[in-house]
Amino acid sequence: MQRVVMIVMALVFVAMAAGSTTVYFQTKAEYDQRKQTERVVKERLRIAENRLKEQEETLQRLRTDPDYVSLVIRRRLGYAKPDELVFRFEN
């Protein structure tokens, strides 16, 4: 009888160990996936923050620097100052 109890206890222990191992590896895989997602999101956030900073600097220059405004208008819209020639090339 004692031998049967020991065998049953050993089988229960092995089953619990196998179940715990399975849960551990599933949890580990999910954790690794979430860490990878976090890295990707942090990189996207860094890029977005840099872009926002550049846009804020550009906006500030547009608000305060008339020479910069003139440069932007001339480049983007193709305007020219009086007595100035503008050459446009097809790409």
Image (tube, helix red, strand yellow):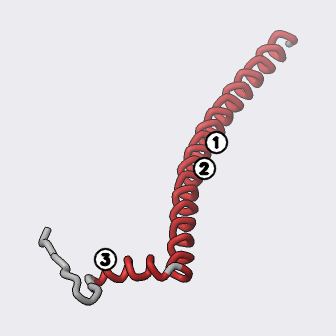
Q: CA distance from mark 1 to mark 2?
A: 10 Å
The residue that mark 2 highlights is 38
Q: Position of residue 45 (x, y in %)?
A: 57, 58
**Residue lying furthest top:** 3
Which quarter of the figure is the N terminus placed in? Answer: top right
Which residue is tagged 1? 31
What secondary structure is marked by label 3? Answer: helix
| Residue name at image x 44 percent, y 76 percent | 68
**Label located before the other in sequence (3 or 1):** 1
Between label 1 and label 2, give the one nearer the viewer: 2
What number is the disc on residue 75?
A: 3
> What amino acid does circle 3 point to?
Arg
Residue occupying the point 13% across, 72% down: 89
Q: Nearer the viewer, residue 32 or 15?
A: 32
Q: Position of residue 6 (x, y in %)?
A: 82, 14
Q: Report the residue at 44% width, 81% height from top.
A: 69
Whichever of labels 2 and 3 marks the residue nearer the N terminus, that label is 2
Determine the residue located farthest toward the bottom in the rendered image. 82
Where does residue 84 sit, x and y in percent of width and height?
22, 83
